[in-house]
Image: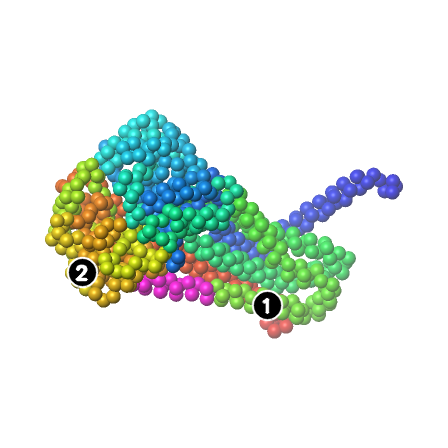
């Protein structure tokens, strides 16, 4: 053995030889690509489109489904809802129920609630409606988020009278306070009341919603702590270390009878991971799109493999090399290097397409797509996915040429080609299978896109229950301190409605709290006078809306029986309500509904039903109508309302006129969220529209790639068989 030299020297020499051979193969592969620029351009473009599409969709899937929530130990964060034995579910809970859960449960590090409400900022330039949230004092500690300036809420600030403190978002701090480092300790006016700024949260603190700009403590009044009928709070929790979701659910089922009162038996808590609640139905749609775009990549690989097989000149080249003594492993290595080099070039081109098109992707994404506001980026996971897909694509489309060009029958191919015959029947049959497969998968994607388009068209054709055309909505809220009494709010809104209705071009105008499809929702428990009690766990609640007389006419909601609200319905008259068809069905009221008495929120059954109206779609076109009750704002007014105006005039001009009328009533009163009702309807199906467009685009690209592959194969076949079919 010593005559051959030192063993380590032999190993290094062998390694150097292999490296040198691989480098030679790469140089040769690169020369081959340059030698055939047309073929190379088609292959790289096909791969760029296929890999780029996969990278783009995976970046969205990664951002929404795979990336952990931006909180501490997010896998332990949950939301807790109510669930009935009948399968009905309530999203929000009452304050007493939250208190019972906090006292009885042992599986949570803590439970925190979120309340709803808006704020009006004054005294800092132009008055502005601010989207904020009222939160339990412990919620940011549960999430693991600390203010970048100042401090968090304290437990004692959950008390009425001590709750006038506020945490600001970083974006609000920069926009309205110019990033003043001395902001902590300053006083700002919210709803005409002084609030002390105690801190500024870090940038991109998107909780609980994307556009939340400030947070105040959630303080319960004594009445709220006794009110089991108002379900107004969403509950978040953090499981203790080592506690599984199953164990936590078992304990919540166990304590349900102890925390529910006599009228609430049959209901229990249902625990869901916070990530699952946030993602919602988007998971299935995104995974379906990822699978579809994966099929596009397969079509692209089959396309390139077919083009490679059609190059009979390369078959002759490798047949000669085999005849001269080239080993099969060398031929395979050469083909694999060429395939991987093409794949890498296509992958780089696709990554560049995604990099420069990422902003456009975010812009055209559905605004209601969950977590999209956290950002879509080419992070390490996305680049790793792209690298894996690129390598797999290179091996995949290079596999067929490798099997054909490295087979032991190469010498036979050399003899056949020397006689000028067509390509071998086996290779021709394999190319035909690839073309048929490309077309079949393309047709499958087209059928899928067609079904999605058909389903989406049916969704859009669903009856909304109202006419959104030529309807404009805008939101406004009255500060409690400036308008403390019910009569103050009603007087302001009556004057505003009278002014708006007198504007030229206005057909009708009305007010509503909880506009359909706006994302606003209030739920209250309902009791029916003289009706037998519902079965345990059966839904006994209804959505709640405050409206003005003329609302149903403005929205074009059909009235079925009874009378509409009018200006005689006041606090000193009989308390009245209007219900929808689903309410009548759910509570089994039969045909004689008008003049029946109901109670709401645990109050006595003294509210008279005066009319039944058609159902509307309150939360989504695909969602079934819910039981709903309408109250006139002249008998109960909470101050935050949407003004809806039906007009044929330009929305911008109408908004300007409404703003002028509002200034005459209260120049400090802002209006916000001005949108056409058709825009609100379109936004409610944004995710579905995006998925339909992407699926249609994928199927179109797949069909284009299949056509390119078919054309390329036919063109090569004609070129190679010109002598046989008599063109020359």
First reached walking from the N terminus: tag 2 or tag 1: 1
The residue that appears at 63% across and 50% down in the rendered structure is 30
Q: Is residue 280 magenta?
A: no
Left/right placement of residue 674 relative to residue 425 reads left
Q: Is residue 200 visible?
A: no
Residue 588 locus on image (x, y percent): 28, 63
Query: Is 464 covered by the magenta stretch?
Result: yes
Q: Residues within 10 Å of mark 1 (few under 14, many from 20)?
A: few
Q: Residue at x 50, y 46 (%)?
A: 244
Residue 211: which quarter of the image? top left
Write down the residue under mark 1.
433
Residue 595's tag is 2
Q: Nearer the viewer, residue 338 or 439?
A: 439
**What is the quadrant of residue 622 in the picture?**
bottom left
375 horizontally vs 172: left or right: right
Image x and y of residue 699, in percent: 47, 61
> Could you tell me how far apart the alpha carbons at marks 2 and 1 are, in whole angstroms?
73 Å
Residue at horizontal 43%, vertical 43%?
A: 105
Give the residues in magenta. 446-473
């Amino acid at each position: 053995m010593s005559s051959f030299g030192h063993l380590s020297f032999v190993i290094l020499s062998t390694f150097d030889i292999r490296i040198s051979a691989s480098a030679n193969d790469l140089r040769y592969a690169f020369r081959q690509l340059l030698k055939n620029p047309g073929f190379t351009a088609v292959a790289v473009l096909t791969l760029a489109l296929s890999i780029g599409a996969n990278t783009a969709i995976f970046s969205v899937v990664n951002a929404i489904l795979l990336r952990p929530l931006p909180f501490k130990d997010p896998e332990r964060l949950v939301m807790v809802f109510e669930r009935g034995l009948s399968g009905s579910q309530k999203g929000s809970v009452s304050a007493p129920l939250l208190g019972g859960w906090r006292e009885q449960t042992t599986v949570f590090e803590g439970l925190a609630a979120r309340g709803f409400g808006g704020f009006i900022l004054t005294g800092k330039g132009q008055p502005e409606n601010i989207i904020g949230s009222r939160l339990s004092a412990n919620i940011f500690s549960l999430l693991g988020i600390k203010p970048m300036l100042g401090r968090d809420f304290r437990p004692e600030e959950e008390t009425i009278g001590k709750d006038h403190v506020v945490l600001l978002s970083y974006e609000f701090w920069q926009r309205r306070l110019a990033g003043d480092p001395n902001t902590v300790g300053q006083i700002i006016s919210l709803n005409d009341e002084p609030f002390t700024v105690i801190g500024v949260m870090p940038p991109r603190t998107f909780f609980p919603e994307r556009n939340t700009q400030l947070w105040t403590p959630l303080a319960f009044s004594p009445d709220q702590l006794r009110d089991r009928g108002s379900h107004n709070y969403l509950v978040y929790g953090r499981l203790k270390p080592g506690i599984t979701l199953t164990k936590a659910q078992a304990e919540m089922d166990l304590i349900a009878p102890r925390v529910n009162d006599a009228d609430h038996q049959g209901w229990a808590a249902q625990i869901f991971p916070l990530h699952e609640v946030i993602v919602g139905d988007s998971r299935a749609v995104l995974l379906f799109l990822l699978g579809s775009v994966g099929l596009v990549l397969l079509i692209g690989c089959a396309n390139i493999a077919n083009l490679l097989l059609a190059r009979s000149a390369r078959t002759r080249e490798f047949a000669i090399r085999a005849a001269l003594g080239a080993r099969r492993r060398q031929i395979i290595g050469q083909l694999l290097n060429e395939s991987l080099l093409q794949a890498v070039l296509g992958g780089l081109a696709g990554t560049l397409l995604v990099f420069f098109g990422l902003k456009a992707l975010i812009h055209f994404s559905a605004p209601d797509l969950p977590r999209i506001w956290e950002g879509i980026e080419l992070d390490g996971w996305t680049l790793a996915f792209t690298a894996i897909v690129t390598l797999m694509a290179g091996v995949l489309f290079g596999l067929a040429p490798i099997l054909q060009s490295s087979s032991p029958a190469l010498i036979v191919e050399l003899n056949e080609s020397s006689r000028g015959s067509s390509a071998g029947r086996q290779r021709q049959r394999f190319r035909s299978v690839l073309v048929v497969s490309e077309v079949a998968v393309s047709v499958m994607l087209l059928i899928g896109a067609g079904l999605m388009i058909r389903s989406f068209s049916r969704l859009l054709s669903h009856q909304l229950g109202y006419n959104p055309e030529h309807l404009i909505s805008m939101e406004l809220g009255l500060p409690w301190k400036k308008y403390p009494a019910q009569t103050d709010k009603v007087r302001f809104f009556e004057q505003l409605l009278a002014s708006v209705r007198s504007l030229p071009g206005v057909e009708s105008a009305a007010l509503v709290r909880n506009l359909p499809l706006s994302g606003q929702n209030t739920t209250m428990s309902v009791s029916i006078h003289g009706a037998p009690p519902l079965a345990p766990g059966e839904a006994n609640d209804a959505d709640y809306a405050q409206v003005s007389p003329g609302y149903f006419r403005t929205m074009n909601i059909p009235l079925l029986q009874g009378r509409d609200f009018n200006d005689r319905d006041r606090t000193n008259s009989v308390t009245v309500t209007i219900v929808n068809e689903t309410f009548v069905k759910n509570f089994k009221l039969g045909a004689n509904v008008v003049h029946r008495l109901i109670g709401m929120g645990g109050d006595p059954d003294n509210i008279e039903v005066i009319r039944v109206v058609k159902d509307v779609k309150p939360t989504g076109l695909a969602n079934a109508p819910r039981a709903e009750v309408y109250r006139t704002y002249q008998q109960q007014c909470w101050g935050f309302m949407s003004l809806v105006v039906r007009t044929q005039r330009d929305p911008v001009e109408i908004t300007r006129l409404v703003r002028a009328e509002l200034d005459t009533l209260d120049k400090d009163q802002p209006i916000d969220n001005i949108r056409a009702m058709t825009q609100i309807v379109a936004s409610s199906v944004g995710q579905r529209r995006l998925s339909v467009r992407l699926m249609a685009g994928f199927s179109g690209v797949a069909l284009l790639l299949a056509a390119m592959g078919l054309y390329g194969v036919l063109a090569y076949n004609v070129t190679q068989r010109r002598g046989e079919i008599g063109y020359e």
